[in-house]
Structure formats: structure tokens, C-alpha cells
Amino acid sequence: GENVEQHPSTLSVQEGDSAVIKCTYSDSASNYFPWYKQELGKRPQLIIDIRSNVGEKKDQRIAVTLNKTAKHFSLHITETQPEDSAVYFCAATGYSTLTFGKGTMLLVSP
Amino acid sequence: EAGVAQSPRYKIIEKRQSVAFWCNPISGHATLYWYQQILGQGPKLLIQFQNNGVVDDSQLPKDRFSAERLKGVDSTLKIQPAKLEDSAVYLCASSSQQGGLGGYTFGSGTRLTVV
């Protein structure tokens, strides 16, 4: 089955800096890669996703890039704000079910 | 649209007791998932339903966990008997497309503590 590795496990940045979270996947058949944000005690919420026919996707301050050859994808957050502090999960699927990474705790200091 | 509803929000039980969780997905979503999220880890799939049929239960500990979705809408997940290592948040999610394409909508989860 699919295996998703996510790094780093914790990321601390200053407000206004950029943050990058990286994930690798094992199943070359995977073709959909969403990112979820989970604030403390709350449900995971989809923030951005990318499909395998696209190399990059942007939505305001967040962007996701995908390298199918290397089987890795990354989340980029620019101009970070304190409200970006949360746990971020990457996931991958190839028409079965989503397999999640272990999460990255992002801490944005004012 | 209304979200995915789950109950209860919290549950504390002693080991070897039984417990049941309930989930009502978004109206019209044929696919329903139960995930287990242990503190500090990502969600791990327990079972996937498509309408009232099981698509994937390969990671469900069937000696103690069971789940059903009798009419293809609501679902219940049961643990009997519970172990200490079952302490986790149990998340229900639904999607309009099989395989999770387009993403899941998660419920708020049930936080289970086994003492």
C-alpha cells in the first residue's frame, strides 16, 4: 500500500517568514495530493490540493508543488501569520483511500 | 451544507468495556470513512464504506472493532473490549467521490480515553 513520509515534524518560524513542508510517497499510481490543516482540538480541514497532471497550484499565500518523477510534493506558505500555527498533514491517494503523513506542527511567532 | 456530525465528542471508559461512536455524513456523500488519530500522529484508516458496502477494512482490528452502515447513511463504530492503546480521536469523514478525490470533509471526532 501507499506510504507517506512528512518532514519536518516541527517547524518554527517568525511572522512574515516563509514555511515549507515536504512529503514523499511510495505508490507511483497515486494521483491526488491534498493538504489538511488541523488546529488544536479541531477537525482536519482541506486547505489546498493538487492532481498529478499539474506541477504547481497557488491559493493566495499557500502553494503546493508536485514532482511526480521524484514522488514528492511540498506545501509552501508565504508571509506566515500567527493564525497559521497548526498541524499540517499531507496525504496521497490513487483511487483507493487517503494515506496521511504524520503531520508537521507549524509554530509562527509574532 | 451541513457538516459531518459525530457523537459523542468525548468518552472515558475503563479497559475491557465497550463503546460505540456514531457518524452522520454530509447528505449525498456515498463514501464514508472511519479514521483513528493517535496523539501526535496522522489519521490512520480503519474502514471505508461505499454506500452500505465495505470497500476496505484491511486495517480494522476485527477481533475488537466493528462498524456498520446499514442504510448507506449513518454509521456506527464499536470497540469491544477496549484496550488502553485504543485511546485516540476517532474521526469520521465523507466524500462525494470514491478514493477521496476532491478531499474529505471530517467530523469533529470523538476523543476516547481508555483508563
Image (spheres, grey):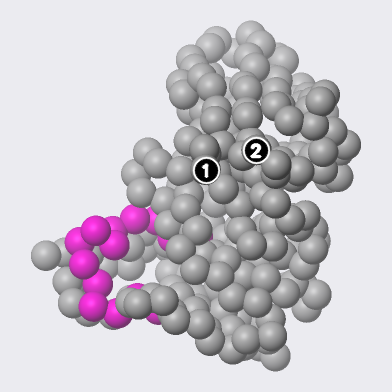
Q: State which chain disc 1 sits on.
A: B
Q: Position of residue B83 (x, y in %)?
A: 63, 21
Q: Is residue A88 magenta?
A: yes
Position of residue B104 measured from the top left corner of the image (x, y, whole percent): 61, 52
Classify residue A31 by image quadrant. Answer: bottom right
Q: Is residue A34 left or right of residue A3?
A: left
- In the picture, residue A96 is in which quadrant? bottom right
For the residue pair A53 and A108, the one nearer the viewer reads as A53
Disc with the residue nearer the chain's start (1 vs 2): 1
| Residue located at (46% from left, 63% from top) | A47
Residue at 52%, 43% (x, y): give it: B1
Q: Residue A17: image x %, image y %?
A: 22, 79
What amino acid is found at the position of numbered circle 1 in the picture? Glu
In the image, taking residue A82 as reference, residue B105 lies left or right, namely right
Q: Quadrant of the N terminus of chain A?
A: bottom right
Q: Which residue is mark 1?
A: B1
* Image: B26 above or below A27: above
Question: Is the residue marked by circle 1 packed among few (<14), some (14-19), or many (20+) residues within 10 Å?
Answer: few
Contact between marks 1 and 2 (CB within 8 A): the answer is yes
Q: Would residue B87 be seen by someone viewing this image from the given angle? A: no
Q: Residue B48, which numbered label?
A: none
Considering only vertical position in the picture, is B113 above or below B100?
above
The chain carrying label 2 is B
Q: Under tag 1, what secondary structure? A: loop
- Any part of residue A69 in sight: yes
Q: Which region is colored magenta?
A: A76-89
